[in-house]
Image: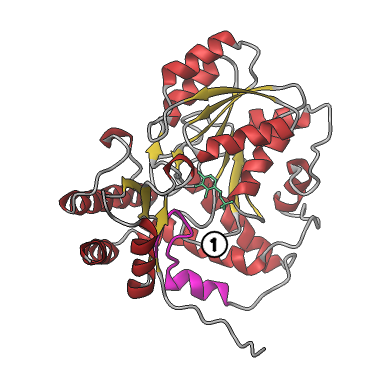
Amino acid sequence: MHISSFNPPRRILMGPGPSDISPQVLNALSRPTVGHLDPLFINMMDEVKYLLKYAFQTENEMTLAISAPGSAGMEACFVNLVEPGDKVVICINGVFGHRMQENVERCGGEAVLVEGEWGRAVNPDQLEQTLKENTDAKIVAFVHAETSTGALSDAQTLCAIAKQYDCLTLVDAVTSLGGVELRVDDWQIDAIYSGSQKCLSCVPGLSPVSFSSAAVEKIKMRKTNVQSWFLDQSLVMDYWAGEGKRSYHHTAPVNALYGLHESLVMLYQEGLENSWKRHQQLHQVLADGLTELGIEFIVPENERLPQLNAVYIPEGIEDAKVRSKLLNEFNLEIGAGLGNFAGKAWRIGLMGYAARKENISLCLSALKEVMGQ
Ligand SMILES: *Cc1c(COP(=O)(O)O)cnc(C)c1O
């Protein structure tokens, strides 16, 4: 068998992630690898931490990137905060909420579900009712931006309700970070995780997380060890903590972190609020174009994610055929439906570097051509 270097074509990634990566970030990835305990690298990690605090809008000291994808960030939050017997209220309105339930149960916790409609935001009244009936709940968890359905939940309101019932709040911000308003400190979020490959437009495989002092307190007061050695944040803390404290925990993915640093610098230079605005404005352009093509949105307008446009596949259109033509003839990737929406929906991402006007024009004209065939 003859095997040579792998040279993928240049695709335009407008699915649910990974999103398009800018040449600037791709360049950063190929810079010379240095040792992960090299003072220069440690200095860069401190900058990553500073930039992540900016992106999350938090002063949390424990803000870092887990060396693994968003799912590991999810797991890190649950395995550290949930002790056996803890009652955790989970709002479910799509695929990722179900994964939260899995996590809680595997930690020996008791999951109490607030089940909502797919394609809608989490209903705050429903959460409040559940908390009234479960005053012994310790944590409230929900997905801010449900990538499986395109729905955006009101994280600020949900957290405020959770706080009235003395719960810690645990939020999935994998798709929301950088794409829509998110304020960890102002909204009283205690544990949050994200991913590098959605609106940050970096390579997959890193998961920014942040823990409030209340969350750190709960971790320190645990009666049992975190069952995962790798994700035990009390051990990782020493690796990421301030000067002079670096001790070996695992080998950081050095070059991937160069990429994250670069993508965060881009976000910092653009300005967080400008990035939120750009996603919203371009979403409107895409939405207008899709409506013109007769394509309908799943989510009501005021609950829509600008960075993930979930739409119904029009009557008589073959899902797989359209997506494969977009890929093969236009080098354009859009996402298929997930879970309840498999075969019924497309998910068109406008995340990070992919959220640009020329991509929207290409997507609309390619869809028009392919669907007309
Ligand atoms: C993509 C995604 C994840 C999982 O992230 P991975 O990097 O694929 O592990 C979790 N939650 C949400 C809402 C996501 O969109």
Query: Of the residues shown, which amino acid type is indicated by label 1?
Result: His
Q: Residues within 10 Å of mark 1 (few under 14, many from 20)?
A: many
The percent coordinates of residue 114 (x first, y second) are 52, 22
Say which residue label 1 marks.
261
Residue 185 belongs to the span the image colors magenta? no
Element at badge 1? helix
Q: Is residue 164 above or below residue 108?
A: above
Depth check, front residue: 69 or 182? 69
Q: Is residue 46 above or below residue 116?
A: below
Whether residue 235 is visible: yes
Task: Check the picture and name the quadrant holding the C terminus.
Answer: bottom left
Task: Say which quarter of the image contains residue 87.
Answer: top right
The percent coordinates of residue 2 (x first, y second) are 64, 90
Whether residue 216 is visible: no
Task: Say which quarter of the image contains residue 105.
Answer: top right
Residue under the point 77% across and 41% down: 234
* Residue range (magenta): 13-30
Q: Is residue 173 above or below residue 41?
A: above
Direction from residue 221 to residue 321 in the image, left or right = left
Residue under the point 54% across and 63% down: 203
